Image (cartoon, rainbow, N blue to C red):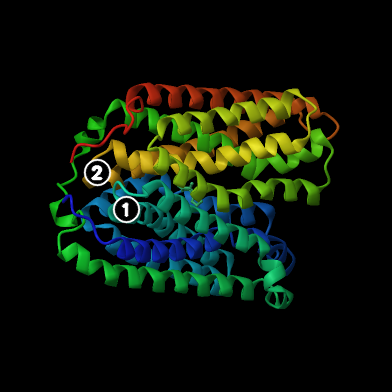
């Protein structure tokens, strides 16, 4: 790794292309939900089949993302962004144009195989170009644009009403078209990247050492606290917010479905703007660990407010919204500071292996606790064990964030990874 970096204008151009590519990727990721009803009414899919179209995305990644991370270190962010964007396009096209469920599920599997490694490659791309300058802001912007892709998929029934009026296929064909645009942005990024890479301004795949399993144990203590926080925080926030919160708002707080869904979506929309804003703040103050600890602390507080008080739901929504924007805005730049650049992909890959397993486990555990306690609109108290479970997990996450702060974050410029 050289101390010289590409020019600011090149870095921002690459950042914009990576953000556009992420927008398309997150749009396809969230494209099944809006057509779920049409898939059931027009193709006779059951709830389990629709659920499987999303679950099959995570399934291979419990193992494969680690390989993906290693490949990013070995072949470089640009090449891996391009290759995986191609895999994602193949997956999205197969999903949209398959005549049967098996073909669609294979398409989603293919998309999942490409998409998580694609996500690592895009984070690595921004770490390559932004190094020590405006890194959290640039990553926050890219993630914010990605969240906009997710929100756009949710809004697509309004924006592409005529496509939805024709049936389940045109909306998925639009998603495949957006995956093609993501590939075009990735191609342009790969093409522009060749210059700075050849000039030795970026870490090159050729200089990245060969992967050795034993190296996984050589990440420092701060990395393992960050990994534990990643697993606990994402497990709680994704299992609660994406799976159970709407039902919980309806049954415990008496909201109707539309209002509960709207309340949930504000968390998402807030993140579009707040993630880059928090990234910018961290860059300005050059502090990461205290912000991470603060963001992690807001989650158990929000869950406590939800479960133990009758305060307005706006309070807990605002707290979860800040946590959902602040933690990712700091976590990924922090990861790039506490591991060597040549091991960044591997480090994120290992974090996401554990993260995917944690999210699946938390979904399963929360569902099981609700079933055991008979949670329902008639028995809102039955949700208490799930909330205790999420509360304890988020508090443990908070402890990890504090340990991380003590380990890596006490100095003004915090940990800089050895090259
Ligand atoms: N492993 C991904 C999971 C994800 C979420 N949306 C699409 N993929 C991840 O953690 N990404 C970082 C993030 O905060 O979205």
- Asked whether mark 1 and ligand 1 are closer than 8 Å, the reply comes as no
- Quick one: SS at disc 1? helix
Q: Residue at x 45, y 45 (%)?
A: 279
- Asked whether mark 2 and ligand 1 are closer than 8 Å, the reply comes as no
**Residue located beneath label 1 in the image:** 130
* Residue 103 coordinates in the image, percent (x, y): 52, 67
Q: Residue at x 52, y 29 (%)?
A: 294
Give the quadrant of residue 15: bottom left
Pick the front one: 246 or 132: 132
* Residue 220 coordinates in the image, percent (x, y): 27, 29
Give the quadrant of residue 255: top right
Residue 99 in view of the camera: no
* Residue 291 coordinates in the image, percent (x, y): 47, 33
Q: Nearer the viewer, mark 2 or mark 1?
A: 1
Give the quadrant of residue 414: top left
- Quick one: SS at disc 2? helix
Distance between the alpha carbons at the discs numbered 2 and 1: 17 Å
Q: Residue at x 51, y 38 (%)?
A: 234
Pick the front one: 101 or 281: 281
Query: On the picture, is 159 further left or further right than 227?
Result: right
Pick the front one: 365 or 148: 148
**Residue located beneath label 2 in the image:** 343
| Disc 2 + disc 1, Cβ < 8 Å | no
From this view, report whether residue 324 is shown above or below residue 5. Answer: above
Query: On the picture, is 91 further left or further right than 395?
Result: left
Pick the front one: 189 or 351: 189
Q: Residues within 10 Å of mark 1 (few under 14, many from 20)?
A: many
């Amino acid at each position: 790794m050289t101390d010289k970096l590409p020019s600011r204008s090149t870095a921002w151009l690459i950042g914009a292309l990576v953000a556009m590519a992420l927008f398309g990727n997150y749009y396809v990721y969230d494209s099944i939900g809006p057509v779920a009803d049409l898939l059931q009414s027009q193709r006779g899919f059951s709830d389990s089949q629709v659920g499987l179209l999303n679950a099959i995305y995570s399934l291979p990644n419990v193992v494969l993302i680690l390989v993906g991370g290693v490949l990013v270190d070995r072949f470089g962010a640009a090449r891996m962004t391009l290759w995986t964007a191609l895999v994602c396009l193949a997956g999205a096209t197969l999903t949209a144009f398959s005549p049967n469920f098996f073909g669609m599920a294979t398409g989603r599997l293919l998309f999942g195989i490409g998409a998580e490694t694609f996500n690592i490659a895009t984070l690595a791309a921004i770490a390559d170009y932004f190094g020590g300058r405006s890194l959290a802001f640039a990553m926050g912007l890219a993630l914010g644009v990605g969240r906009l892709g997710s929100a756009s998929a949710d809004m697509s029934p309004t924006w592409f009403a005529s496509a939805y009026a024709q049936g389940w296929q045109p909306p998925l064909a639009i998603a495949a078209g957006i995956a093609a645009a993501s590939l075009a942005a990735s191609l342009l990024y790969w093409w522009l990247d060749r210059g700075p890479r050849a000039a030795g301004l970026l870490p090159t795949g050729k200089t990245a050492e060969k992967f050795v399993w034993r190296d996984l144990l050589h990440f420092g203590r701060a990395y393992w606290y960050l990994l534990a926080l990643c697993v606990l925080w994402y497990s709680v926030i994704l299992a609660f917010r994406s799976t159970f919160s709407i039902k919980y708002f309806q049954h415990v707080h008496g909201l109707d479905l539309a209002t509960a869904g709207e309340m949930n979506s504000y968390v998402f929309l807030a993140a579009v703007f707040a993630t880059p804003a928090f990234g910018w703040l961290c860059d300005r103050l050059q502090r990461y660990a205290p912000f991470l600890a603060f963001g992690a602390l807001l989650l158990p507080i929000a869950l406590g407010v939800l479960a133990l008080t009758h305060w307005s739901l706006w309070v807990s929504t605002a707290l979860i919204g800040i946590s959902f924007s602040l933690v990712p805005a700091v976590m990924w730049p922090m990861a790039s500071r506490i591991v060597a650049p040549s091991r960044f992909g591997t480090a994120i890959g290992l974090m996401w292996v554990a993260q995917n397993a944690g999210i699946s486990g938390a979904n399963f555990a929360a569902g099981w606790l609700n079933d055991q306690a008979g949670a329902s609109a008639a028995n809102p108290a039955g949700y208490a064990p799930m909330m205790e479970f999420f509360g304890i997990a988020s508090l443990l996450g908070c402890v990890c964030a504090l340990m991380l702060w003590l380990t890596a974050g006490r100095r003004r410029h915090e940990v800089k990874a050895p090259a």
